[in-house]
Amino acid sequence: MAKNGKKKRSKRSGQRFKPKPEFRSQVEADLVDRLLYRFVVLVEHGLELMLCAPSELACKEFRQNPDLVYAA
């Protein structure tokens, strides 16, 4: 037994063998490109909406900290 009455565990206890993940090469690169492009477009649109029509909470924060205001 180790100090303080606790059992000392071996370093390998609790570790199990996990197989390495395999890359799924069946996904076409063109499909990935299209999905990434659509994601970027959605993010850009969301950012435009947040900056053009900020929420009440954002407006309150802008009034308190005018340095944060973004002018498009």
Image (cartoon, rainbow, N blue to C red):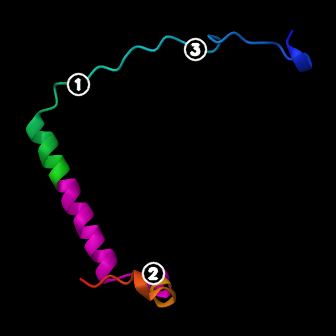
SS of the residue under disc 2:
helix
Say which amino acid is labelled 3: Gln
Q: Where in the figure is residue 28, as x and y percent of width and height?
A: 11, 33
Q: Which residue is mark 2?
A: 58
Judge the density around disc 2: few (<14), some (14-19), many (≥20) Cα neighbours within 10 Å: some
Residue drawn at 62 percent across, 10 percent down: 12
Left or right: residue 26 compared with residue 65: left
Residue drawn at 82 percent across, 13 percent down: 7
State the residue in front, 50 or 71: 71
Q: Which residue is mark 1?
A: 24
Q: Quadrant of residue 49?
A: bottom left
Q: Where in the figure is residue 39, as x and y percent of width and height?
A: 23, 54
Name the quarter where the N terminus is drawn.
Answer: top right
Residue drawn at 43 percent across, 88 percent down: 66
Say which amino acid is labelled 1: Arg
Judged from this view, the residue extending furthest toward the right is 5
Q: Which residue is mark 3?
A: 15
> Do the residues under discs 3 and 2 have CB atoms within 8 angstroms?
no
State the residue in front, 40 or 8: 8
Q: Where in the figure is residue 17, as x and y percent of width and height?
A: 49, 10
Query: Which residues are the magenta region?
Result: 38-60
Left or right: residue 2 compared with residue 22: right
Q: Main secondary structure of the magenta part?
A: helix
Residue 33, compared with residue 9, is above or below; it is below
Judge the density around disc 1: few (<14), some (14-19), many (≥20) Cα neighbours within 10 Å: few
Alpha-carbon distance for marks 3 and 2? Answer: 47 Å
Residue drawn at 29 percent across, 82 percent down: 52
